[in-house]
Structures are given as structure tokens and as C-alpha cells.
Amino acid sequence: MSNYHIKHLEEYYQVYRKSIREPENFWAEIAEEHFLWRKKWDKVLEWDFTKPAIKWFQGAQLNITENCIDRHLGTRANKTAILFEPNNPDEPAQHITYKQLSERVNQFANVLKEQGVKKGDRVCIYVPMIPELAIATLACARIGAIHSVVFAGFSAAALFSRINDSDCKIVITSDGSFRGKKSIDLKGIVDEALEDCAGVKTVLVVKRINSDIHMKEGRDQWLQPLLDKASKECVAETMEAEDPLFILYTSGSTGKPKGMVHTTAGYMVYSAYTFKNAFQYQENDVYWCTADIGWITGHSYIVYGPLANGATTVLFEGVPSYPDFGRFWEIIQKHKVTQFYTAPTAIRALAKHGTELVDQYDLSTLKVLGSVGEPINEEAWHWYNDTIGKKKSPIIDTWWQTETGGIMITPIPYVTPTKPTYATLPFIGVQPALMDENGQELKGNQVEGRLCIKFPWPSMARTIWGNHQRYKETYFSAYENMYFTGDGALRDEVGYYRITGRVDDVIIVSGHNLGTAPIEDAINEHPAVAESAIVGFPHDIKGSALYGYVTLKDIGESRDHNNLRKEINQLITDRIGPIAKLDKIQFSEGLPKTRSGKIMRRILRKIASNEMDNLGDISTLLNPEVVENIIENKL
Ligand code: WT7
């Protein structure tokens, strides 16, 4: 029996029990047998959730790129590491072998060094889904620089706050990006973001769309000529196990995004091990995750996890709807994809277009179908299972978070029997707990509560960049000695978990995690707006969509409401990005508040979801009269 690759249900239970009873021995074995270390650890785990302080593999030294690239060069030099599928289907795909990846990462790493980037420096990567995004990420890891990848759909203001928060010295971007029929001026967004970032001295620009952009003298440089001059050899920096590997921002309950810090050894071990098992990855598979590398899904399951296993990972630049809604299925056929990992929102959007487009393509290579980012509803689950998987490819509904670094609850395909809408069983080493409102753990099955994790796992985020206190408050203060996820969940009669959704002020729209506070902050910047509150409501495709309640100042009263709505959505687009735009904006005389002045989002959420008969007691509100008025004018 190999603990590294679980093949039967009994084996799962056996390995799971071992991972809980002897976590240190268990993870030491996995780490020892399947990874390359410059120096082994002195101690497997040290932890204290009250501080919180978590250290895995202390004393070990390594470089993650040697594990993801160099160690494969002996046996897999000519195997495709990254299979790039461009936005335009007429543009040929690129097969980047492990050998080529090694050379390109080393060249990029040498360019960064030449630009003065050193171990521990933060590098902002704002690049679309092209090979250079993965290469830049790995190049940072090669030299020990901390990468901060910012999703290339974020606005200039969002980019600015992320560059500024972690004090990045250098930004890597491109002249633009292709998305479906559109091309986007990324460099223009970077220029705008950098107007207020004096700390950024260098911008490296990848040429992708050949647009005529402005290059700022002394700051901006085209990347290619620098790469051409750079050596293809670059000795990897020696990293300590707990040295930060990257920062990735996620939204929270205040306006400021949280820079989650992931470190090197534990993240590597867990992302690789989960990849192997959750996708039942085999040597000649062609694995495709449709996420963007700008999200954690892309970090762990496009770049690090697959490459650490020597896999072929598809990197797709485009969108599911271009040139038509058959694009995903065409790519699966074309590259003989074996594992396909996407989000419920994409599944719902594609299901709307029926089976005709699907039937045109041969999907028989598929073995595993993954889902991530939000709960998958029953209908979408069945469509995915029947129409795409032809009832023979198990669906893995993988629950996890930016903060967890890797998959936490998931069926193991061909091992764990699936159940529609259930993420099923905890992954090896993961100890979930459901808590009630009074902070008591709900033991046994058939219970529902707030989802916590009671023991550290190797890839958990270690802190929030520059704000350890916020890390403690957000994740370790709700329940004693527990990591609190922010999600609700239930455990059924056999111990399967079903995630019921967020229990905090985060709303998941099309799989994107959006905090209400930053959106409200953006709206409140409008001169006519007095106050606002955002809630989610059910939406066919997006899962949840945003409903905004806005009260106006006197100067707003006479304004045309449709114009105001446009202006508000424009502000949101500018401050955060188009993903955060509101579907509905209702202007109301007031917002329901508690006597201490807190907006009662719970009531607004119910109204937006048409659950008017279920509002609960509103008599204790400061202003119960506004509720009726809001209901009457509901959109
Ligand atoms: C939140 C984390 C890590 C993947 C991308 C999202 C929700 C994620 C599932 C799932 C139900 C899910 C949770 C979680 N979520 N996967 N399979 N079923 N909900 O990462 O942006 O950090 O968001 O996404 O609410 O807390 P993220």
C-alpha cells in the first residue's frame, strides 16, 4: 500500500485514520518519499492556534521549482509540462516541455535578478492566462521572491491597493490580453494603478496583443529582449520550509483585501498530494483546470500541484463562450483531456445551451470532473454528471479556500461514492468540526453548524501580510483552538459534508469571493449616496447575484434613477472590477437597523430573495417602518 496514492475506500479510511492519529509521522513519510529536499526537517510540526503560529517541516531546506521542474528533467524532459491553448482557436496550441519550461523559468529568474529582485522581495504579477504567467510565478519561486499574482480582471484601484499593501518593487504585466472577441488594455490599467505607487521602479511588459502602448521611460521595459540575453541556467535559491512562497489576496469583511501568506514546504507537499489523489492523476493524463492562475485554484491546481507530479497541465487563455459555447468541449476533444476542473457557474452557463454543442465533440477521454468555488446545485450536478461525464466520470465537488491552500473536503474519484451536492469526506489529514452558535462542537451525524478545522494541515495560510492580528481575529477567534472557515455545513447520516454557504459578509458571485464592505465603500463614494447595503440573492447562472439597497442624500432625490444606477455600477467597476457590479439597485428611504445602528442585512437578504413571509421579528428594529416600504418597492 502506498500512502501517496489512495485507490480503495478501505485504503482511504486506513490512511485517513493514520493521518489523524499520527499526523507527524504520516506527513513526514509523504514528504520524505515524494519530494526533493536540500536538507530534511528537524521537526515536522509545531503549532499553537491561540497565537496563531503554525510551522511545518521546520529546519528543512528546499526549492519548490526543483520539485516542480528540475527533478523531472531526467525522465520527463520532453514531456509537455504546460499545454497552452490560446483564446483564438485558429492560433496553434503550444506544448512547453519540462526542458523548455526549465529554460524559460531560469531565463525569467535571471532577468528578475538583473532587475535587482532578491529573496523576500515582493513581485506583483498582473498577467493574463498566457504561459508567461506561470513562468513568472515559477521564476519568483526560483529566486525566493514572493509572488503576488493579481487576477488580470481587477481594476486599477484594486491592483493599486494590492501592490501597495505588500510593497511590491516590480510589476510584471503584458501589453494587453485577449478575452473572447475583446482585447483589454492591461498596461493602461497598470499605468493608472502606478500613478500613486512610488515604490514600483520597474515594470516588465510581455508582448501579447501587439498593441501600441505607452512605455514610461526609465520604468517600463519589454521583457523579450531581456529574456533573449539571459542565461538558461539559474541556481535555485535555498529556501527555508517556512519562507513565504506567495501572497494571494482575498476579500474580507472590511474594505481592505487580506494578503494571505503561504509558505514553502507545507504548501508544496499538500498541493501535490491532494492533486495526485483528488484527481487520481496518472502519468499520461492531460489535466485541465479552467480557473485563472490569479486565484488560489490556479496556483495550487494549474501550477504547483500538477507540476510537482510531473503532469501535463492545460493553460487556457480564453472564455467558455468564444467562438461559441462549445469551446470547452472542443478543447477536451482536441487535447484528449482526462481530468477537467471547473466552477458551478460555468457549468450552469453551459448547461443553458443544451446538449447539442456538447454532442458534437468526443469527450470519451474524460475520467474525472471537478467542481470548485461555490456549492454546486442539484440540477447543475446532474447535468455535469450525465451530459459531460456520461455517468461514468465521477464528479469531485472540492471544498476549500484561498486560506487553506489546497482541497479540504472532496470525494476521491473511484474511491468515495459521490452524492449530488455533497463535498463528501474530509481529505487525508483534515479534521473538520461543526460548531453550534454557543461554541460547542456538534458531535455525531445529521448535524448542521459552522465549519471549522481543529488541527493544522500543511498548506494552511500562516498569516495575513502585515496584519497578524487580523489573521487571528478572522480565523482563530470565533471558536477556541479552531480555524473558522466562514462557511456553514451539514454532516449527513453517513458523515458526508455538504457546504451550505457563507455565514459571514462574503458573497460568492460566479465563483468569485466578494466582500460586501468594499462594494459598499465604492457605492458610498458617489456624491448622491448616503448609505448602502449589499446582499446576495439566488441567480440561475451566477449562483448568487448582488442586490444593492441605497439611500440617497437630498442632492440625489431629483436625479434620474437609471442614470444613478449606471454611475454606481461604474464606480464599482472602477474600484473593484466588473465582477462586483450589482444586478439590482433599489433606492429606499432608509435601511433597517438595530438599536445600536447596525444594518440588518439578514432582513434585506430575505427581501431580495423573495422570502417576505419569513422575516422574523422586526419589532426590535430602530426603524421597523422602513421594512414595509422596502418590500413595496422591491425590484
Ligand atoms: C469560499 C472560498 C478554493 C477554491 C476557490 C474559491 C466557497 C469553495 C466550494 C464548494 C461550496 C465552496 C466557500 C469557501 N467554496 N468551494 N465545493 N462547495 N462552497 O476560493 O475565493 O477563497 O473562496 O468558496 O464559501 O469559503 P475562495
Image (cartoon, grey):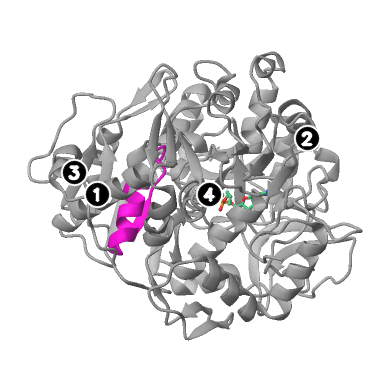
The disc placed on residue 227 is: 3
Q: Position of residue 367 (x, y in %)?
A: 69, 38
- Asked if disc 2 and disc 4 are in contact, CB closer than 8 Å, the reply is no
Q: CA distance from mark 2 to mark 4?
A: 23 Å
Disc 1: which residue: 108
Residue at position x 44%, y 65% from top? Answer: 261
Mark 3 or mark 2: name the one nearer the start of the chain: 3
Disc 2: which residue: 392
Q: Position of residue 199 (x, y in %)?
A: 19, 57
- Tag 4 secondary structure: helix
Residue at position x 22%, y 55% from top? Answer: 233
Q: Is residue 149 magenta?
A: yes
- Asked if disc 1 and disc 3 are in contact, CB closer than 8 Å, the reply is yes
- Asked if disc 3 and disc 2 are in contact, CB closer than 8 Å, the reply is no
- Tag 2 secondary structure: loop
- Left or right, 617 with reference to 314: right
Can you tell which quarter of the image residue 94 is in?
top left
Q: CA distance from mark 3 to mark 2?
A: 46 Å
Neighbor class of circle 4 (other Cα within 10 Å; few <14, some 14-19, many 20+) is many
Q: CA distance from mark 4 to mark 3?
A: 27 Å
Mark 1 or mark 3: name the one nearer the start of the chain: 1
Range of residues picked out in magenta: 135-163
The disc placed on residue 301 is: 4
Q: Nearer the viewer, residue 552 or 297?
A: 297
Ligand 1 closer than 8 Å to label 2 CB? no
